[in-house]
Image (cartoon, rainbow, N blue to C red):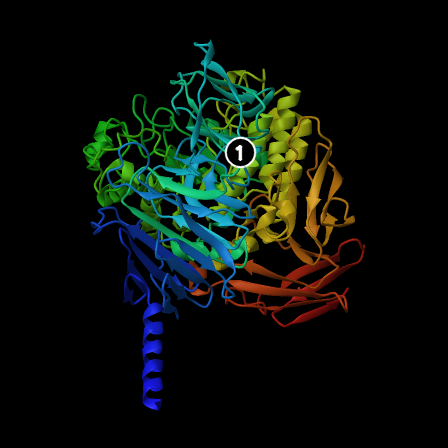
Amino acid sequence: MKKIVFGLLILIFALTGCATKFSHKIEKTSNGATIYLDSLTVQVEVVNKAIIHIKKYKGTPTDSTIPDYVTVLKPQDTAWDLKEEAEHVTLSTDDVVVKISNTGVIRYMTKEEDTIVSETNDLTYIKPNKGDGNAVSQAFLAGEEAIYGLGQFQSGVINWKNMPIRLQQDNQEIAIPFIVSTKNYGIYWHNYSITDFNVTENEVLFTTTIDEEKKIRETTFTPDKTGVYTFMVESNSQNKRGKNCEIRVAIEDDNIVDYTVFWAPVCYSGQKYLEAGKPYKITFQNTNSLEMGRLFYNEPDYNKTVFSSKFGNTIDYYFVHGENPGQIVSEYQGLTGKVPMFPKSAYGFWQCRERYHNQEELLENAREYRKREIPVDNIVQDWFYWPEGTKGPEWDSNKYPNPKAMIDELDSLNLQLMVSVWPEVINDPLLKKYDLDQHKLEGTDFLDFTNKGVQERYYGMLKDSMLNIGVSSIWLDGSEPESRPDDNFQTSVGPFGDVANCYSLLVTKSMYEGMRQDYPDKRVFNLTRSAYAGQQRYGAASWSGDVSGTWKQFSEQIPAGLNFVMAGVPYWTTDIGGFFRDSNSLNPIYDSQYTNTEYIELLTRWFQYGTFTPLFRIHGYVSETEIWRYGQEFEETARKFIDLRYQLMPYIYSEAWKVTKEGKLLMSPLSYYYPKDSSTWEIKDQFFFGESLLVGAVTKYGERSKEVYLPEGRWYNYWTSEKVTGKRQVTVNAPLDETPLFVKEGTILPLGPKVQYTSQPTEKPLTLKVYTGKDAEYTLYLDDNESYAYEQGVYTEIIINYTESNQEISIKNGSGTYIDFNQNPMHFIIEKVGMEKEEKVIFNGNKVQVQL
């Protein structure tokens, strides 16, 4: 009898064990597993404990000819476990649990098995022979969250949850397929073709044409559901030459899309709360576009996050986990490339305009800045410095008879020169000289940068004409590229459509790698109009393109820049004042930018905002943008904010070190630091500059006070030192010479003396402003300002601590070997904010303690 019972137990255990095995074949690999489902193969790769790489394909995948241009982190030596159950395979690291169902749906969970995010099969597909529509698509269920990133768009959107947009490079539009959620995850979509984010499922069909010439149509729309509908205009980036496009979508009297722009992007997004069963008049205007345009929408219960790409045969993405947005962005930069330090001069003021017409005109204005004692570090030569009838990096000897002598004089003025260069060349002798004449994208003058030899020879051309005579940095304009071949055009690695979005990445790569090799002691800084995932590792910043000088486009720059940096590329700027400025500058709103009261106020508010962006740069089309051109009142306010920027330089440079060392952001939305406070999710006119400064931007004409949301804790008004309790809206005075600026309690803010350029020697002490209320710590960073010696530890960190309980400041040495304080002691003034008392301290490397 005992033998029979024992035999039954063995049989039960055996059957139970079989039932727990997954119902499909699994191959365990060194870094994960390959799972063979009925019609789908899923590869799960553990990159590190926080990053999971997913690939899904049908049948046997063919090896792609397209290199991996973006990711640089190889799978790490990471502990992970694989567990099989009847309907799931579970892969776990120390940070994240990945559960793959027998239908191929993947759910990401915490170690406590709380769901972070889950895929859904709705709008998930692979269509290798796609016919109409996109080829590959992956959807995730959206929860109670806000979603940031995707690059830069002019729709005024800060939170991309459920909002549709097309990720396609264009002037003013930058496509980076990476998102960060307040639910502690990020997703990098690894596909270089044009991609629809939250692809639209419905189209509004127009029944009546109001004006065929102006392309105005209307219809009546009766929604089936009540809630927020999201809309996307599909237009054409090419407009009638010389005319502004007017793109508007009005639902009744509410313009949910409203643009008057010279460069018309491909897509525009908007949203509107609608009631089921109620008829709404929708008017769609697409004046001066080359096509009528289409209007698409999604219903309120969309509740998905979708990446849907034009080309591809594999679903390919990376899941990134972090406890907060800062960790997610840092992990993502580990995956796609860390950010090098810029030369300190790059963080100073940039004088730029379209354009200086000759060598003497540029020098006259450079001298005038120094004569007027207006701080500035950089001056920019925009296009058309090349010989007439050509385009490319060659100086017109009639206008620039001795560019090296020009640069030498700028050097004597402690000014750096940046020169505009395009990745298109219209100059047959130059093309033949560098063996580039047979390497253009079909139908364009843009070069094929997928070709490694083209990258090297194009860089060589710039080295010979620019870098060898002392040009400090290159302005890589039109790097979308501005003109594109047909999708089927064969680049050196495959069809152009397969790599359409990553062109700028390759252009900046060519410059960075060449400059680092040939000028190893000089940090690379270049400016580019486009960007892509991973571009942050190539010493490049981006700007928001040729935007118009209007209050609306100014307000849109703030969320555009914040989403750009949340896509993992921390350095961004905008044309202060807008590129198109007045009636002589393709902007008919203002008669004269130099005398129009409203425009000068717009310029003032834009200038104040630009002071707190990662790069501080004024620019304008057919404009003289020097700050003394706009009257005494503007000049005084501009001087005030330029001085503030330079006094903040010890803080800015130390925060930039955190960007390089820790993967932080220099500019960020409020939700970057306060992701659990849903009141921050939709705020698009406030942001952090570094960790400690909260900036409010005034974006309306005539506004002299502003509602500002302060997160939890207590905050000091920078201008008045008044202390305010947060987690609420407050009304802040905003006279024309100020913008709202707050410092959180528990902050040590280092300020330098007034200087004329960032690295100007000075004997004056550094001021440490202590905002009491909580314990505080700050790491002050110092190095030689221009070389890569910091990569070998040649830098100095000074650790400054404040203890609230005993009101004591301590200063001590941190990491690095750059400064010997015994030989070069450092002088500080310690100021307790709100008190008149100051303490003077000399730091010689030994720990100093001061009672406040």
Q: Position of residue 448 (x, y in %)?
A: 25, 37
Judged from the image, the secondary structure of the residue bearing numbered disc 1 is: helix
Quadrant of the rendered structure where residue 720 is?
top right
Judge whether 365 appears above or below 19 on screen.
above
Question: How many numbered callouts?
Answer: 1
Q: Position of residue 685 (x, y in %)?
A: 62, 38
Judge whether 589 appears above or below 658 on screen.
above
Pick whichever, 10 or 629, lies toward us. Answer: 10
Mark 1 belongs to which amino acid? Arg
Quadrant of the rendered structure where residue 331 is?
bottom left
Q: Is residue 531 left or right of residue 277?
A: left
Q: Position of residue 724 (x, y in %)?
A: 77, 49
Residue tagged by mark 1? 367
Q: Position of residue 119 (x, y in %)?
A: 42, 50
Judge whether 243 appears above or below 58 on screen.
above
Q: Residue at x 34, y 30 (%)?
A: 395
Q: Is residue 734 left or right of residue 628?
A: right
> For mark 1, does the 10 Å Cα neighbourhood hold few (<14), some (14 to 19), or many (20 or more) residues?
some
Kindly give the residue lying farthest to the front in the view shown.
Answer: 1
Kindly give the residue lying farthest to the right in the view shown.
Answer: 836
